[in-house]
Image: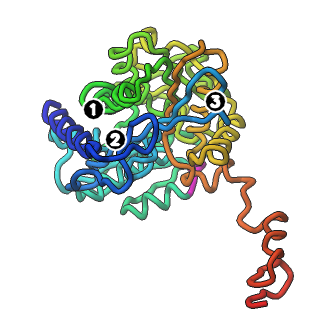
Amino acid sequence: MVKLFLTLAAAARTAVHAFNIAPSARPLSSLGAVGSRGAGRGGVYEDLTGMVGNTPVVKISDKLAPEGVEVYAKCEYFNPLSSVKDRLAVAIIEEAEASGALKPGMTVVEATSGNTGIAVAMVCAQRGYDCVICMAEPFSVERRRLMRMLGAKVIVTPKAGKGTGMVRKAEELCAEHGWFLCHQFENEANWKFHEATTGPELCPEIVNDFKAAGKKLTHWVTGYGTGGTFHGAGKALKDALPDVKIVLAEPEAAGLLASGTPTPRNADGSPAESHPAFAAHPIQGWTPDFIPKVLDDAPMDALMDELFPIPGDAAVATAKALAAKEGLLTGISGGGTMYAALETAKNAPKGSVILAMLPDTGERYLSTPLFADIPADMNDDELSIAKSTPSFQLIPGEEPVLAA
């Protein structure tokens, strides 16, 4: 573990140096948080894992944010494989290497809704490990294809088995073949990496960015998949900003925490059975059909100030609004988190500064309800524009027109 955090500290220092602003650089915004375009990153990376972290914070305009408060988004899709789970994958693999649990030539296995699998596949590709991912049937097919593109084998488990089914399959494969299981839902390296990087210890991203902008963060809003972001970054934020209010969001349709019912566990901390409060919901990456041990181990009374239920349709609608009104392309989970942030903003004291986590990119949701009403073909307005000039028209039912 000591070796891991020395490694993370070095990576954090490298990342911070990479964002130093040249004295003559002209800031891009009045917040003064970034250097000018074309200034470069101040160096080069040995490999892409050094690019994990230091994701940007972006202000939400008054097109969405209520008057009198400031709402921001931390855009985790600026990680190299476009999600917050890049942090987790680096943490788990490096901790396993340091402890000797993961040795050259071994196969790495994980059960995932997709983002963790993509991140683990990325790190395995870079480090030279074979990778096997177990993923339940309902999750988006583009995630499977991305993992396979990165060299992973993807084992799809039946829909009826839910999240616990893909976890059982991963455990079974490791027991049979002697492979290394990441245990993202139980592994304490998960939340410790977030404590060290997303929060204010080794790489004080959130705290430093708001301090540099002359802002005091009053609210932090996040959902949970494994619970690592909430547990790790939440601890670090509360240490640095004792008055900050933490809002934890979960799907309204799957109110596992709201139910007050615990998840029975096996000896290794994995879930023994599916949670009775679970129901299908559209927020992929959030809230499997059990309460992850990483989340269960968090000191809830000290960290969580509010538990916020998210309607699935509101998460989808807010993700679409972020794209159409702010140019921020995030997934349904990002929409859900921002919905909680915007609703929190409506009742927050004037002058409040609220930060929402955007866990991943909207491109990971092309086959989900997020894009269900986004057509591939031209609609009537687009056809009207196409017909407004005579050349190069492709009108359904008509011969293509090139030069008029």
Q: Residues within 10 Å of mark 3 (few under 14, many from 20)?
A: some
Q: Quadrant of residue 147?
A: bottom left
Secondary element at image label 2: loop
- Kindly give the residue lying farthest to the bottom in the view shown: 403
Q: In this rendering, would 90 be left or right of 242?
A: left
Q: Quadrant location of the C terminus? A: bottom right
> Is 170 part of what is drawn in magenta?
no
Cα separation, mark 1 vs mark 2, equals 9 Å
Residue that badge 3 annotates: 65
- 1 vs 3, front mark: 3
Q: Nearer the viewer, residue 190 or 360?
A: 360
Query: Within the image, what quadrant is residue 122 found in?
Result: bottom left
**Residue 53 marker:** 2
Dominant secondary structure (helix, strand or loop) of the stretch shown in magenta: loop
Q: Which residues are magenta?
A: 137-141
The x and y percentages for residue 272 are: 46, 28
Q: Which residue is mark 1?
A: 203
Give the mark, 1 or 3, whose residue is nearer the N terminus: 3
Q: Earlier in the sequence, mark 1 or mark 2?
A: 2
Residue at 40% across / 24% down in the picture? Answer: 214
Residue 155 x %, y %: 46, 55
Please give the name of the residue rendered at 66% of the width and 44% of the height, measured from the top-left corner.
325
Secondary element type, mark 3 = loop
> As displayed, is residue 122 above or below residue 320?
below
